Amino acid sequence: MRALIVCVVAAACSGTAGVRERSEALAVATHCGRHGCPKTAEALNLGEGCYAVENRLYQCAADGPGEASCFEIRPCPEVCDDRVTDGRGFEVSTERCETLWRSYREAHRPPPTCAPVKLASITSAVTHARSELTLPDALVLEVVRTGESRLMFEAEVCATDDGVVVGEPSRTTGFAQLDEVLRGEVARVALAPGECANVALVVSQFECR
C-alpha cells in the first residue's frame, strides 16, 4: 500500500510540473506571437498560473486534459473597461495575477537614488551663494515622504582660540540626522577670531527617483 501511495504522489507531482512547463512555454509563445522576441525570452513564474515575459503579464489556465491557454493582462491604471474573457465568452478575473505582479515588482524595486540638496547660508542678514550638499539617500527620502520642500537650521557660532563653537540651535529642521549634518556646516562659516554670528542654513529641493 505504501508503494502505491508513493507512485500516485510522484505521478501527480510529475503531472503538475509538466503543466507548469507547458504553461511557461505557452506564455512565451503568446508573448512572442503578439510582440515578437528579438532575443530568447523566458517566462518568470509568479505562481497560480501567472507569468511575466519581458515585463508583460500573462495569465494561463488549463482548458482541459493536456490543454492550456494564456492571455496577456494589459496595464490598466486606475479605472478601465478592458475585460478579459475565456474561449467560452465568460469574463475572467485577473486580480490574482495583478496582485502577484505588483508584489513581485515592489519586492524587487531598486533602491531610490536622491540628488544633492540645495544649501544656502544666511549670516548677519547676508545671503551667500547657493551650493549643493550631498546627504544620505535614506535621509533625503525620509524628508520627501513628509512632503517638506524647504527646511531651516539656525544657531549662533563663535570663533575662539580653541576653534569654532556652535551654540544651541534656535531653530531646527525636525530631523535629528539632518540637524547634525547642518550643525557641522554651520561650523564651517568663516569668522575672525573672537567674532560671533547668527547663522541660518536653508536646505531645499529634496528629490529622489
Image (cartoon, rainbow, N blue to C red):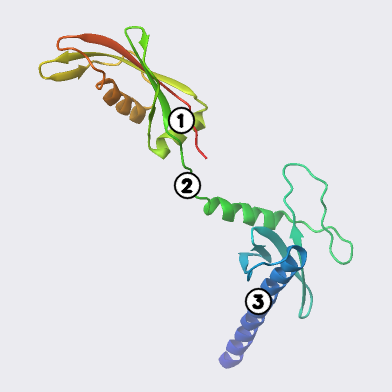
Residue 103, given in percent of the width and then of the height, sits at 59, 53
Q: Classify 27 as above or below 156.
A: below
Can you tell which quarter of the image residue 31 is in?
bottom right
Q: Classify 16 as above or below 191.
A: below
For residue 21, the mark is 3
Q: What residue appears at the point 36 percent right and 15 percent down from the top-left corner?
A: 128
The one nearer the camera, 67 or 123, is 123
Residue 70, given in percent of the width and then of the height, sits at 76, 67
Task: Tell which residue pokes out farthest to the left in this image.
Answer: 161
Dot 2: few (<14), some (14–19), or many (≥20) neighbours within 10 Å? Answer: few
Q: Classify 209 as above or below 70.
A: above
Dot 1: few (<14), some (14–19), or many (≥20) neighbours within 10 Å? Answer: some
**Mark 2 sits on what residue?**
111
Dot 3: few (<14), some (14–19), or many (≥20) neighbours within 10 Å? Answer: some
For residue 155, the mark is none
The one nearer the camera, 84 or 72, is 72
Mark nearer the N terminus (1 vs 3): 3
**Mark 1 sits on what residue?**
143
Asked whether disc 2 touches disc 3, contact meaning CB atoms under 8 Å apart, the reply is no
Q: In which quarter of the image is the N terminus?
A: bottom right
Mark nearer the N terminus (1 vs 2): 2
On screen, residue 43 versus residue 63, left or right, reads left
**Viewer-nearest of discs 2 and 3:** 2
Q: What residue appears at the point 29 percent right and 14 percent down from the top-left corner?
A: 155
Which amino acid, by three-letter code, is at mark 1? Val
Can you tell which quarter of the image residue 36 is in?
bottom right
Whole-number angstrom distance, CA of label 1 to CA of label 3: 46 Å
Badge 1 marks a residue whose secondary structure is helix
Badge 2 marks a residue whose secondary structure is loop
